[in-house]
Image: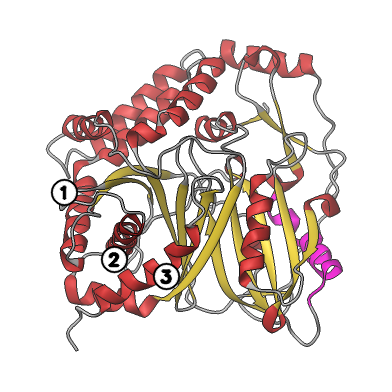
Amino acid sequence: MPDRLSALDASFLYMDQPTTPMHVGSVSLFRKPKSGFDYDGLVDLISSRIGLVPRYRQKIREVPGRMARPVWIDDVDFDVTYHVRRSALPPPGTERALCDLVARLMSRPLDHTRPLWEMYLVDGLSGGRVALVTKTHQAMVDGVASIDIGQVVLDDTASGRSTPEDVWVARSEPSSWRLMYDAFSENVSRPGNAVEAARDAVRDAADTVTKVAGVAGGLFSAVRTAVRPAPVSPLNVPISTQRRFAMTRTDLEDYRAVRRAHGGTINDVVLAVVSGALRNWLLTRGASVTPTTTMRAMVPLSVRGDAETTGSIVGAGLLGNQIASYLVDLPVGEPNAVLRMHHVAHAMREHKESGQSVGANALVRVGGFAPPTLHALGARAANGFARRLFNLVVSNVPGPQHALYAAGARMLEMYPVVPLAKGQSLAVGLTSYDGGVFYGFNADRDSMADVDELGPLVTEALAELVATVPR
């Protein structure tokens, strides 16, 4: 049987529109080793390791008549040099120039006739550094265990690692008649799929009965939040096809110190910092801010957790699409930094205890068995309603706390680039790595000319919380 896209990954594909391309990105800065780090070496490195991510040599084919969801097929004309590209910054190679380049690259949609990813080696950065910029469609990464091409090139040591020899022969592309026949055969041979999906959804709900009073209450709470329109915000305007990008770095130990002093999770501190930065951003714009002013964030959470990252957010497409989404009202009107954090922690705790994430996952599974054409329309409609449900996305990827290397070059910093939803002019992505927390701000070019101000405002909001930590 064909390798068919999952319901969730098909949703990301159908949401792809000129003003809302559904690719995620990353910007990684490296210190160039004495041995050098050039384009040919990067191509050789990816060529030797791309077998670890077979999806990156596959493209998407639609089934004629939308009889079923699209399928993955091998790209018989795969050319790694099309996907791995090079660029250079003009002297003096500032980070501002890098951000301008990233904005231009992220504004361009991916070519849907080829595997849906690109990587750029950017030379000329000041201080003897180079950058890797990646673009990957969210439909490419399926499952918690999946990894992307950016992770494949990274090693724990400068000496790298050996990989098995990759002997790959592309399978011939199926004909349109074959795709239609397979879709028809699946529908005939598996008529019980919808019933089985519904049973799985019920089973998911039953698993949470021991933790909550009942999943119905959690679903009711989720629906109650969703039907309340998101607060009016200058972030929610019609957006263009062009982007701006900004980034800033902070210290992970500051977040840990605040968590130790005030409780909660690292993620609670992150959301409190974002709340404080957005509060001051509104004030710089002369917007009306009262003690009850809020902004609603869509917070995608990983189903996984551990002692350090429990409650941390996973950026869609970076660690997989097995995520649950929460709507969190950020208390941007609260002038006290500690109270902002307590409000956020309380809201997140209520979400986790309500079982809403299970309800959301169950609904996604059932939705996958709708006719694909209606599924596409539903996904587009959901994207169109995004600005009614939430004001922005905040996505945080917990990364490794040790140095990583690519072809012997040490990675210094890594910034995520989160796609914009329709009618939303800002998406905040951040990741922790090797003692730092790195923010990437992806913004609409026309409505967010002041996106560069958000970095200093994040630093200021974090410093305000750190000042409350007893010495």
| Magenta span includes 99 | no
Q: Secondary structure at mark 2?
A: helix
Quadrant (top left/top right/bottom left/bottom right) for the N terminus? top right
Circle 3 packing at 10 Å, graded few (<14), some (14-19), many (20+), is some
The residue shown at (78%, 17%) is 176
Q: Of callouts 1 and 3, which one flags the residue occurring earlier in the amino acid sequence?
A: 1
Give residue 280's quadrant in the image: bottom left
Q: Secondary structure at mark 3?
A: helix
The residue shown at (38%, 44%) is 234
Q: Nearer the viewer, residue 61 or 168?
A: 61
Residue 449 placed where, x, y %?
52, 53
Q: Nearer the viewer, mark 2 or mark 3?
A: 3
Q: Which residues are magenta?
A: 37-53
Give residue 197's quadrant in the image: top left
Quadrant (top left/top right/bottom left/bottom right) for the C terminus? bottom left
Q: Of callouts 1 and 2, which one flags the residue occurring earlier in the amino acid sequence?
A: 2
Q: Is residue 359 left or right of residue 448?
A: left
Residue 100 placed where, x, y %?
64, 60
Residue 307 placed where, x, y %?
31, 68
Q: CA distance from mark 1 to mark 2?
A: 20 Å
Q: Determine which residue is flagged by label 3.
A: 456
